[in-house]
Image: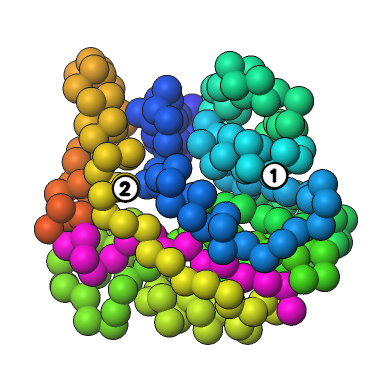
Amino acid sequence: MAEHDRYVKALIELHSGLDRQGPGDNDFSKFIIEQIPALPPDPRIADLGCGAGAGTLILAENFHSRIKAVDFSREFLDQLSARARQKGLEDCIEIIECDIGNLGWGAGTLDLIWSEGAAYNITFKGALDAWRPLLADNGIAVISEMNYFSANVSGTVTEFMQNAYPGIKTESGNVDLINASGFEVLGVHRLPSKAWWDNYYEPLREKINTIESPGDSVIQSVISETLEEMELFKQYGDEYGYTYYVMRAS
């Protein structure tokens, strides 16, 4: 197995079984949904980079419409399927295993695109360019993106991001990208730091404590990077984080 594939496999292993594969919060997601303008009856919705489906399930419960749940990981999608069955929502969710940057769907076939913490995989601009054509006239996209909260960021943070996410921008920089990509910005909402700890980092730390792979250098490397990331956020979480951008196809 190639080194990159082993690394991805280790990441999936580390996050498997968790409610969320990244920072987020159910109440915050519901708040964001309340900011969305009225959608057509039986709206066509896709959750892109859905992971194990925390957002997908909220969308299904809220809109009572069929949701396209897209992720590259069959393991996460299987976990979503199980959770949907437990909630009686399996008929509301269409599981799709594919690359979120190469969906192959027709133009204007979606009324709402939802994506939490996944756009960075194809870059924020790449996501905007790839997904804008999929939206119907006045269609809505909700995309969360890691960004700096100002242009004044500590050197420790910028040094870390050079390796972790070299494409990171400020919120204002992302708003400029949105406006230049055929969208109108309707809302900019920062995910509270509490959501990072309560719903992601603490469950992730508990999972790390259960992993016993002393001979597996890849999983140990992933764990080390994850703990470093936690420590960075503990010290500098007021300088960067996820922002949810609500936008309309213009």
Q: Describe residue 91's horizontal placement relative to residue 197 as left or right.
A: right
Q: Look at the picture and state if 40 lies above or below 86.
A: below
Q: Describe residue 60's horizontal placement relative to residue 225 as left or right.
A: right
User: How many badges with numbers are in the image?
Assistant: 2
Query: What residue lies at 73% left-to-right and 48% top-to-bottom?
Result: 45
Task: Mark 2 or mark 1: name the one nearer the start of the chain.
Answer: 1
CA distance separating discs 2 and 1: 23 Å
Q: Nearer the viewer, residue 79 or 30?
A: 30
SS assignment for the magenta stretch, majority: strand
The kind of residue on which mark 1 rests is Phe
Q: Describe residue 125's horizontal placement relative to residue 236 as left or right.
A: right
Asked if residue 34 shows in the view, the reply is yes
Residue 91 drawn at (x, y percent)? 76, 25
Q: Nearer the viewer, residue 178 or 121?
A: 178
* Residue furthest left in the image: 235
Query: What residue lies at 21% left-to-right and 60% top-to-bottom?
Result: 237
Residue 37 drawn at (x, y percent)? 67, 65
- Label of residue 63 in the image: 1
**Residue 238 lies in the magenta stretch:** yes
Asked if residue 78 shows in the view, the reply is no
The kind of residue on which mark 2 rests is Ala
Residue 122 drawn at (x, y percent)? 56, 58
Q: Look at the picture and state if 110 lies above or below 90.
A: below
Query: What residue lies at 66% left-to-right and 20% top-to-bottom?
Result: 88
Residue 157 drawn at (x, y percent)? 21, 66
Q: Quadrant of the C terminus?
A: bottom right
Under circle 1, the secondary element is helix
**Residue 227 lies in the magenta stretch:** no
- Label of residue 195 in the image: 2
Task: Report crowding for label 1: few under 14, some 14 to 19, many 20 or more residues within 10 A (C-alpha).
Answer: some
Q: How is the image coloured?
A: rainbow
Magenta stretch bounds:
236-250
